[in-house]
Image (cartoon, rainbow, N blue to C red):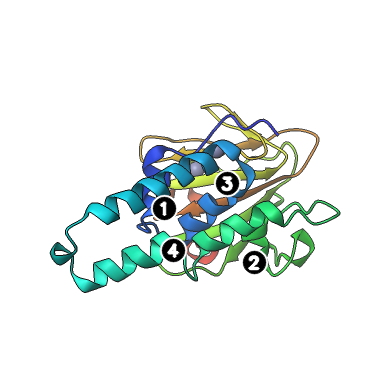
Amino acid sequence: MTIRHHLSNELIWAYSVGELPEAFDLVIATHVSMCDECRARLESLNALGGAVLEHVELADMDEDALHRTLARTQGVGDIRGRGKDAIRADLPGTPVLPQPLRDYVGGDLAQVAWRPVGGGVRQAILPTAKGATARLLSIPAGAAVPDHGHRGTELTLVLQGAFADETDRFGPGDVEIADEDLEHSPVAEAGETCICLAATDAPLRFSSFLPRLAQPFLRI
Ligand code: ZN
Ligand code: ZN
């Protein structure tokens, strides 16, 4: 797998210190489980965080912050700890969903509770804390996601197949980081259904009326 689109340092850092909503953590843990380069960057940032902590005047930190920081450095009981297991968990039969996602779905693609969202596109919202939404998207080969803009940040990670939009082509392992400045209409490449994991922290802005009407029901 040749990954061409990686996480930004800002995202890896925010993940490392635990500042992201759970839905974004999930995208990042999943990408990191697929990508040696971002895993190495995360590990050096984690090490840096640990080193910084040793030099922090502990008295200056409130107790809560200290506990949170320690919990993060040790990766206790959260998804950041789980991401690492993914590397060792290459099961026979090569599942489509990497381990961090299989934990959310309770299995692989066969266990996903898909719902149609129109045009052959299906989605499954994953159970994450408020603040951002994570969904799996299944886009038939050649089909398009309606043209939309973004109010906040949208992270889209390709798990199978590929899509292209106004900016570039995104294949397995690639992550697209979209923000307010980008308006795009992703189209799945011919040949294979495109499966993506997408996280958004604000509703999308659709340019046509019909998706806008359906938006509250689809939570996109
Ligand atoms: Zn990467
Ligand atoms: Zn988008």
Disc 3/disc 2 C-alpha distance (Å) = 15 Å
Indicate if the residue with disc 3 has its beta carbon within 8 Å of ligand 1.
yes
Dot 3 or dot 2, earlier in sequence: 3
Q: Is residue 214 visible?
A: no
Disc 3/disc 1 C-alpha distance (Å) = 12 Å
Placement of 36 over or under 136, stated as above or below: above
Dot 3: element: helix
User: Which quadrant holds the N terminus?
Assistant: top right
Q: Give the residue pinned by disc 1.
A: 15
Q: Disc number at residue 74?
A: 4
Q: In the figure, is residue 110 to the left or right of 213?
A: right
Q: Residues within 10 Å of mark 3 (few under 14, many from 20)?
A: many
Q: Give the residue pinned by disc 2.
A: 103
Q: Is residue 45 visible?
A: yes
Q: Residues within 10 Å of mark 2 (few under 14, many from 20)?
A: few
Instruction: Kindly report which numbered mark, 4 or 3, lies closer to the viewer in this rendering.
Output: 4
Is there CB contact under 8 Å for labels 4 and 3? no
Dot 4 or dot 3, earlier in sequence: 3
* Residue 128 at x, y percent in the picture: 50, 68
**Residue at screen point 41% across, 53% down:** 15
Residue type for callout 2: Asp
